[in-house]
Amino acid sequence: MFTQKRLLLGFLISFTSIIIFLLINHYAGLNLPEALLIPFRWLPIIIFLFYALKKKNLTTWIFFSMLAGIEFGYDLPLVAKEMNVVSQVFIRLVKTIIAPLLFGTLVTGIAGHADLRQVGRMGWKSILYFEIVSTIALFIGLFAINISGAGHGVTVPAAMTQGTLPAVQSQSWRDIVLHIFPENIAKSIAEGQVLQIVVFSILFGIAVAMVKEQYRAPMLRFTESLTAVMFKFTNMIMLFAPFAVFSAIAYSVGHMGLQVLLNLFQLLATLYVSLIAFLILVLLPILLFLKIPVKNFIRAVSEPATIAFATTSSESALPRAIENMEKFGVPRKIVAFVIPTGYSFNLDGTTLYLAIASIFVANMAGIHLSFDMQIVMMLTLMLTSKGVAGVPRASLVILLGTAASFGLPTWPIFIILGIDELMDMARTATNVIGNCLATIVIARWEGEFDYDKARNLNLESEE
C-alpha cells in the first residue's frame, strides 16, 4: 500500500515534474489554458495531504498548509485577500499565552531553582554571545549584497515606488534604555512588550527568592501551576496553527501575487541565500563544536521556525520554542531567560537583513559606497540594531535612520516594503532558530545542558 516513504517520494517526483513542466510552458511559450494547469499544480499537494494523514505530525501539517496556501492564494486571490483574519486570530491567541508563560517560568526558575548570582551570569554571557553572533550576521549580509549587486539596474513596478512610508518615531538612546523598563506591567502585557515583561518577572522572581519560606512556597506553587497550565494551553492553541499558516500564506500570495518574485528575485535570493549561509557557516559549526545532536535539534526547532516563517511573527513561535528547547535538555530557568531576552538583543536574521537592505538602497539610488563607508555603516547598524525589538516597526526605524545618516534617499525603501513580508518570513524564522541555539550555548556554558534529553528527544506533538 501507500507507505509514508512512498507517498513522500511520490510528492517529490510529482512536485519536481510540475516545476519543470511549468517552466517549459512559460519559456517555450506553450500558453496552455489555466484550467488544465490548475489540476497539475494541485496534484503534488494532494499527495502530500495523504502523507500528512499518515505522518500525523503538526510540523508536517504546517508544511502542507504552506503549500496549499500558496496555490490557493494564486488560484483564488480575491478570496485569499480576505483570509488574513484567521492568522490574526491565531496570533492574538498566542499573545495571550506569552505574559503568563514568561512570568511563571522566570519566577519559578529564579526563585525555585537558580541562585541570584546565576541570573547575573546568564545575563552577561547571553549579551556577549548575542553581540558576537549578530555582528557576524551583519558582515555576512554585507558580503552577500556586494557579491550579488542586488539593486543595480532593477526594473520595478511604478506603483511600488509611490505612496507614503508608514509613520515611525525616531528613537534616541534614552528612549531605547527607557523602553526596557516597564512603567506599568498591565500596560506592558497589553502592548506585548516582551522585554519589559521579562524585566518585571526577573525582579519579581528575585524578590520571591529573598522572602521567608512561608511566603515563598505559596508563590512558587502558584507559578509552577501557572506554567503547567500555560504549556497545556499552548498545545491547544497550536492545533489551530495549520489553519493560521494556510490563511497567512494564501493572503500574502493573493495580496502581492507571484510576479513580484520575478521583479525583485535578486534581492530576495540574496537575503535567502545569505540566511542559509549564516545557518550553515555559523550556527551549524556551533552545534558541532558543542557536540549537539544536529538532527534532533532540527526536529526541536522545525515547528517554531515554520510557524514563525508562515506568520512572520516571532511571538507566535515563542511558547512552542520554550517548550521544545526544555524537552531538548535546556533547563527551564535558562530557556525562559535567554529566548525572550534574545528576542530583543539576538535578532540574527533581522540584523543580516538590515545590512543587505542598507546597501540595496544605495545600489537602487546609484550611489557608490566605498568599502570604508560600508564598514562604518555596519558599525553603526551594530549599535542601532540592539535593544529595539519592542519598538513598533523596529527594522524600518533603523533602516530609515541609517539612510538619513549616510545621505541615502528613502524612495528605494518603498520597494523593500513591497516585498517586506516575503523577506520577513525568512528573517523571523532565522531569529527563532538563532535564539533556540543561544539557549543551548548558555546552558552548556553553565554546565547544565542535558545531553541525554537531546539524544533521546521526545516531542509531545510527535507522540
Image (tube, rainbow, N blue to C red):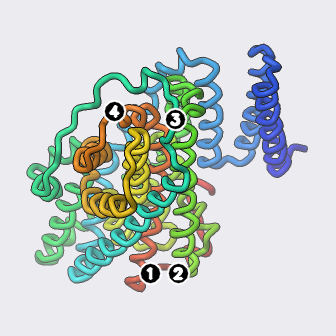
Work out whether mark 2 precedes mark 4 in sequence or the reverse, and give the earlier one: 2
Q: Quadrant of the C terminus?
A: bottom right
Determine which residue is flagged by label 2: 290
> Could you tell me which residue is drawn at 39 percent across and 34 percent down?
417
Q: CA distance from mark 3 to mark 4?
A: 14 Å
Q: SS at mark 3?
A: loop
Q: Nearer the viewer, residue 57 or 408?
A: 408
Of marks 2 and 3, the one in the foreground:
3
Of marks 1 and 3, the one in the foreground:
3
Q: Nearer the viewer, residue 267 or 150?
A: 150
Vertical arrangement, residue 182 with respect to residue 295, above or below = above
Q: Which amino acid type is marked by label 1? A: Arg
Determine which residue is flagged by label 1: 444
> Could you tell me which residue is drawn at 53 percent across and 21 percent down?
80
Q: Are marks 2 and 3 in contact (CB under 8 Å)?
A: no
Q: Quadrant of the N terminus?
A: top right
Q: Residues within 10 Å of mark 1 (few under 14, many from 20)?
A: some
